[in-house]
Image (spheres, helix red, strand yellow):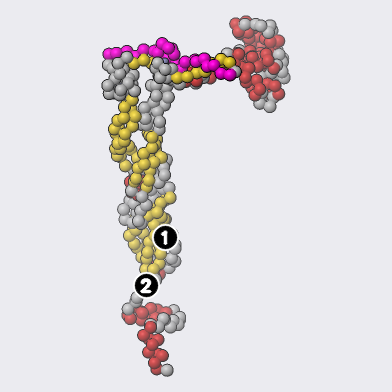
Amino acid sequence: MAENRDPYEVLGVSKDASAAEIKKAYRKLSKKYHPDLNKEPGAEQKFKEVNEAYEILSDPQKKAQYDQYGSTGGQQGFGGGAGGFGGFNDFGGAGGFEDIFSSFFGGGSSSRSRNAPRQGRDLQYEMTLTFEEAVFGKKTSIEYTRNAVCKTCGGSGAKKGTSVDTCSKCNGTGVIQVARQTPLGRVMTQQECDVCHGKGKIIKEKCATCDGEGITREKHQVEVSIPAGVEDGNQMRLQGQGEAGENGGPYGDLYIVFNVKPSKIFERKGSEIYFDLPITFVQATLGDEVKVKTVHGDVEMKIPAGTQTETTFRLRGKGAPKLRSDGNGDQHVTVKVQTPKNLNLKQKEALKAFAEASGEHVTGEESFFEKLKKRKKR
Ligand SMILES: [Zn+2]
Ligand SMILES: [Zn+2]
């Protein structure tokens, strides 16, 4: 790359050359050194330099920066000495920067932004869902009260058929300059226009529906389609369903916040569902085929012989739908082997026989009465 070659020199133009002259010189030289047309050694290098020079001089910002600092920040990076960040302020004069700013902020001055269109407030709506509604989604309709553009006058605040005039005192800005006498002398300050009360407009005959405000409170109904797989605390944004904007600005948004009720039998994390399955120690020992509840209905599940308590089995695709992709999560079934309680005599004998067959000697717990009998005998 050509190190810091003067772009004016490269294009052969003077420092005060017009944009048209720069363009003309560039066309001539780029044609002269174009690698397809010029096979001389060094032509390609020249062609590159010409393009780099034109890139700077055809761009008002880069040109201004080069004129000021002798380099451009864009080519040297932000650390590149005087050509870096510090140059920014100077672009205002070159025409680029400040113009962009004023189009964003309506002139930037407080007197104009006061009556600039402003987006309405966002609203929040809390919606309670059952566990199943959150898993499978739901179509519903909600109703709430919000500030809306008056339907009678369309937001102008004027009675039908009458006009709205720009306030002549403040020229529609809503503010006026007032001279104030202070110990330090006369000081000019801005204050709200006393004729239009800061609105910048004069409504001769007010709309009766909104009393000239242009905005009314209305009951608003929205159809809401809740996607399958939402979770507690998730938010859903409905654009433009908030409150009406000011000065013709757009509506705010509505945020629906979901409050999901827990399930008595399932636990859920994202698209994964967790479920505890109590089984008897006989089922765990001998194995069995059982029915397991899932949000999609009962599912047959095999318990292998010799299953230990707390073993988890996975039922693929039986979890909740994935919120931002296809398919379902899984259901995780954790078996809880139940130790039998309050056995009758027959059951106790069967177990003792089982222990004996296993070569195990189990005394068993003596009941309160059995202990009492033993003590009396002594
Ligand atoms: Zn006014
Ligand atoms: Zn109205």
Q: As shown in the figure, which amino acid type bears the numbered disc 1?
A: Thr
- For label 2, count other residues whose C-alpha is less than 10 Å away and answer few (under 14), some (14-19) or many (20+): few
Q: 155 or 126, which lies in front? A: 155
- Image quadrant holding the C terminus, namely bottom left
Q: 179 or 243, which lies in front? A: 179
Q: Which residue is mark 1?
A: 334
Query: Magenta stretch?
Result: 161-183
The magenta stretch spans residue 164? yes
Is residue 203 visible in the rendered structure shown here? yes
Q: As shown in the figure, which amino acid type bears the numbered disc 2?
A: Pro
Q: For numbered disc 2, what is the local secondary structure?
A: loop
Is residue 328 visible in the rendered structure shown here? no
Q: Position of residue 114 (x, y in %)?
A: 45, 21
Q: Position of residue 57 (x, y in %)?
A: 63, 13
Q: Name the residue: 36% across, 85% down.
A: 369
Residue 340 — which label? Answer: 2
Q: Name the residue: 27% across, 23% down.
A: 209
Q: 224 or 25, which lies in front? A: 224
Q: Position of residue 206 (x, y in %)?
A: 30, 18
Mark 1 vs mark 2, CA separation in Å? 19 Å
The image quarter containing residue 293 is bottom left
